[in-house]
Image: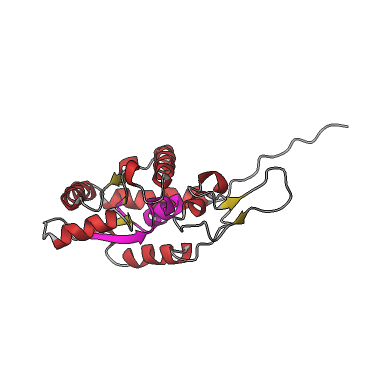
Amino acid sequence: VCAKVCPFNAIVFEKGAKTPARVISASCKGCGTCSAECRFDAITMQHFTDQQMYAQIEAILSENPMDKIVTFACNWCSYAGADLAGLSRLQFPANARIIRTMCSGRVKPDFVLHAFKLGAPIVLVSGCHFADCHYIDANRWTQKRMEKLWDKLEKLGIRPDRLQLEWVSAAEGQKWAKVMKAVEEMRQKVTKEEVEQTIQILKEAEKPKKPKPVKEKKA
């Protein structure tokens, strides 16, 4: 999967070969999409590591988590759009806590679920518009990944709209302000009871399932 999603063909994998996939460092641009898609955690980013991402989520939610909007913003567009909104002195809620990533494609579903486990009422993932992605088409994998995560949340009994996905360019400071106002309105509708229920659901989902008893065959 990792080789398939790389926009720059920086991962070489020979199907059927007994050798592991290898990364061509000179071709890698560091978007992190491969790491987010890898189901085996076999890829470690040199920057924006999993440990760093988890640490930021935990720091954000260590105090008054109900008041926070955990926000993942790509470096090239949405993060710059947020910066422009501030420089333009636009009015929007100040309780968003932004975690910068090089690309929205870096956002693993586990990052979102970790935020919910720690009591986040709402999570926003934001990146470039499809035609403007700094990493060609990496954000299209973000879209697919979030759609799968919405389905998972719904099956677990967690409202999918507590995970928001928005595309904001570096020039769209006004849109960023508008999005943050809308997301803040959503956050205010999330109750403490709902958050506590979410935490319990995710804890239960983590428990290993008991294997089904195997019927012994009669001789």
Q: Is residue 106 magenta?
A: yes
Quadrant of the image containing the N terminus? top right
Can you tell which quarter of the image residue 213 is in? Answer: top right
- One can see residue 69 in this view: no
Q: Where is residue 94 in the image (x, y as percent from the top left)?
A: 18, 60
What is the tally of numbered marks visible in this picture? 0
Residue drawn where x is 39% and y is 52% of the image: 112
- The C terminus lies in quadrant: top right
Residue 192's x, y, as percent? 27, 53
Between 37 and 93, the one lying in front of the other is: 37
The stretch drawn in magenta includes residue 151: no
Residue 215 location (% of width, % of height): 75, 35
Between residue 131 and residue 41, name the one nearer to us: 131
User: In this rendering, is residue 38 above or below 148?
Assistant: below
Residue plotted at (51% across, 48% down): 6
Q: Position of residue 141 (x, y in %)?
A: 44, 43
Give above or below for 115 relative to 189. Answer: below
In the displayed structure, would residue 155 be above or below residue 36? above
Its colouring scheme is secondary structure
Image point 23% across, 50% down: which residue?
187
Q: Which residue is farthest top?
A: 218
Asked whether residue 60 is in view, the answer is yes
Q: Residue furthest right?
A: 219
Along the line of sight, the residue nearer the viewer: 175 or 183: 175
Name the side, left or right, on which 147 lies relative to 184.
Answer: right
What are the residue bounds of the magenta stretch?
A: 96-123
